[in-house]
Amino acid sequence: KRPVGAPDASLARPVTKVGIVGAGLMASQLALLFARRLLVPVVLTDIDDERVAKGLAWVRAEVDKLQAKGRLSADQANRVKSLVTGSTDKSIYAGCDLVLEAVFEEMKVKQQVFAELETIVSDECVLATNTSSLSVTTMASKLAHPERVVGLHFFNPVSVMPLVEVVRAERTDDATLATAFAVAKTLKKNAILVKDAPAFVVNRVLTRFMGEVMRCVDEGTPVEVADKAVLPLGLPMPPFVLLQLVGPAVALHVAETLHEAFPDRFYVSPNLQRLVAANKPGLWSWNEQGQPFLDDETKAL
Ligand code: 3HC
């Protein structure tokens, strides 16, 4: 069945080589997913050799785990490993039919990445963004071919979360959108078409919810009490565990973007700001007065 709002699948263009921009945790997860499901070469880049090597090592280690679990045979594991390669040189994106960026959540950085990609790939190559909350229309606005830009927003952990938000920007054309839906189907993801609005749908709802939980904690509810209190509402994991999974910096960025767009409705937690400013991975703790603070374990990291 065609997803609501998706164009005719026959408009989709073939995807025979994929590029991922970035080699961080999200980018590496995406590289593995695309290689495993599409079975096409996947190339990734980052700003230095160390980051590229780390990303590739993560992919290989995950493939080994899948093989150990019996999800991949030895042959399949070797094939997936050989499909994922990396470099610091963006010219490896030449010949890609789709490049998905998963770099730092900064509009200027993402615009620059897309502008550079336009000088390397063909005019028909789909340029996709995994942004959590930024405007895809603005991201595409300075390009020669904004019609090939689309949002493909995945969720953590990428391998198990079934949903992907496909974001149609103002000038995204039907062939680009159809290609995005076809790719999502091959990735075995449940794709939904969403509007290019701040934080789209999932993060908008999740951030409102997380904002209220964080406000309770900022007002003095201990973290563990807040985590226990809201879990029976049907959440798969406690909210502060989810915050760790998503990453405090990403969560803060989404909250700030939404606060800017809808100041009355979105809360930016000063404790979350403090945690991110301290550049810690995000272990929350609480003192005897029930106030959250950065604990010794976090400080030692
Ligand atoms: N990373 C990678 N894989 C993980 C994982 C993690 N942190 N945690 C669990 N998994 C995998 C397990 O390995 C297992 O895979 P397998 O079936 O291949 O062995 C699978 O998930 C199920 O694991 P479990 O049965 O042990 O655990 P659960 O049933 O508790 O499910 C979960 C784990 C799927 C992570 C579940 O807790 C969940 O859905 N949590 C909520 C996650 C969520 O809301 N994500 C969205 C965040 S918002 C976002 O990402 C958007 C961004 O823009 C901010």
Image (cartoon, rainbow, N blue to C red):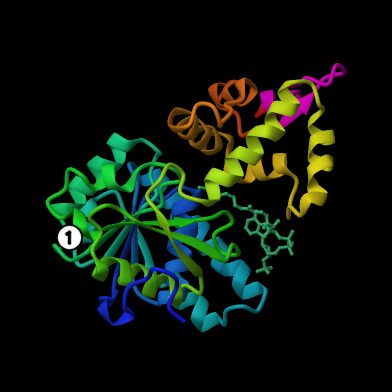
Give the quadrant of ligand 1: bottom right
Instruction: Specify the quadrant of the image occupied by residue 295.
Output: top right
Asked if one can make out residue 129 in the rendered structure from this viewpoint, the answer is yes
Q: Is residue 58 left or right of residue 212?
A: left
In the rendered view of the protein, which quadrant contains the C terminus?
Answer: top right
Residue at 65% across, 79% down? 70
| Depth check, front residue: 63 or 96 | 96
Asked if one can make out residue 80 in the rendered structure from this viewpoint, the answer is no
Q: Is residue 149 left or right of residue 156?
A: left
| Depth check, front residue: 46 or 224 | 224
Q: Position of residue 162 (x, y in %)?
A: 57, 66
Q: Position of residue 165 (x, y in %)?
A: 46, 59
- Residue 67 vs 28, above or below: the answer is below
| Depth check, front residue: 241 or 77 | 241
| Depth check, front residue: 78 or 180 | 180
Q: Residue furthest right?
A: 288
Q: Amino acid at mark 1?
A: Val
Q: Is residue 193 left or right of residue 218?
A: left
Residue at 56% across, 61% down? 61
Q: Residue furthest top?
A: 289
Instruction: Specify the quadrant of the image occupied by residue 93.
Output: bottom left
Report if residue 182 lies within the magenta region. no
What residue is pinned by disc 1? 121
- Residue 64 vs 286, above or below: the answer is below
Dot 1 falls on a residue whose secondary structure is loop
Crowding at mark 1 (Cα within 10 Å: few <14, some 14-19, many 20+) = many
Q: How many numbered circles are shown?
A: 1
Q: Position of residue 97 (x, y in %)?
A: 25, 68
Q: Which residues are magenta?
A: 283-300
- Residue 205 vs 283, above or below: the answer is below
